[in-house]
Image (cartoon, helix red, strand yellow):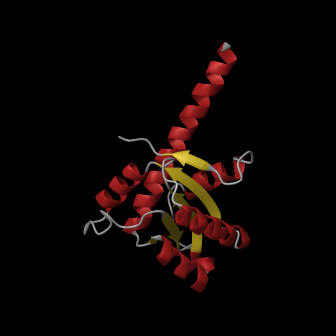
Amino acid sequence: MTPEGTLTSSVTENSMQSIGVALEELLVAAQKQECLTIGIYESAQLLNADPDSVVLCVLAADGDEADVALQIHFTLLQAFCRDSSITILRVSGLRRLRQLLADADDDNQRQDGDIHCILVTNPHADHCHLREVGTYCQESVDQWIPELVLQEH
């Protein structure tokens, strides 16, 4: 690998880590503001009832999950979000995501629940890092749905 390739690789890796941290902080802040809807069924209900209240859709699954039903749900949610101009981000690192949401949730209700779909709601709230995550998604033109890997801490 050339020195330029090494530099580009490390810059990309650093920007991916910073976007991962931004997403984590966004999700924790939104959860504390009660601006998260968690779960595929719950998300589908909200998208059907009030799609204008959704500012970000996070679809979470690890690469080893080959559940056909989950992939069908993802396809339908992605199509609905695209039609409604809702930013979509696919995330792997369910373990980290579960830990993050459990730490931010005083009741720890989501320990074993469905976290495959998370909607950030309330476009009027001041969501920290929403613009940064949205910009990352818009700039990922080489991917139909931008992807991000959450790192264990």
Above or below, comparing residue 113 to residue 52 in the picture: above
39 left or right, relative to 48: left
Residue that protrudes farthest toward the bottom in the picture: 49
Tell me which residue sits at (52%, 52%) in the image.
91
Q: Quadrant of residue 107?
A: bottom left
Q: Quadrant of the C terminus?
A: top left
Q: Position of residue 119 (x, y in %)?
A: 52, 68
Single out the residue that lies furthest toward the top: 2
Q: Measured along the vertical axis of the image, is residue 152 above or below residue 138? A: above
State the quadrant of the N terminus.
Answer: top right
Q: Residue at x 55, y 77 (%)?
A: 44
Horizontal and vertical percent position of residue 66:
52, 54
Residue placed most toward the observer, 125 or 6: 6
Residue 10 at what x, y percent from top left? 57, 26
Residue located at (50% from left, 65% from top): 117
Between 52 and 77, which is closer to the camera in this rendering?
A: 77
User: Dividing the picture into quarters, in which one does residue 100 lie?
Assistant: bottom left
Left or right side of 87 for 94 = left
Q: What is the tally of numbered marks visible in this picture?
A: 0
State the residue in front, 138 or 41.
41
Residue at image position (49%, 71%) is 40
Q: Quadrant of residue 19?
A: top right
Left or right: residue 133 versus residue 117 is right
Residue 145 coordinates in the image, percent (x, y): 66, 54
In the depicted structure, whether residue 23 falls above or below residue 46: above
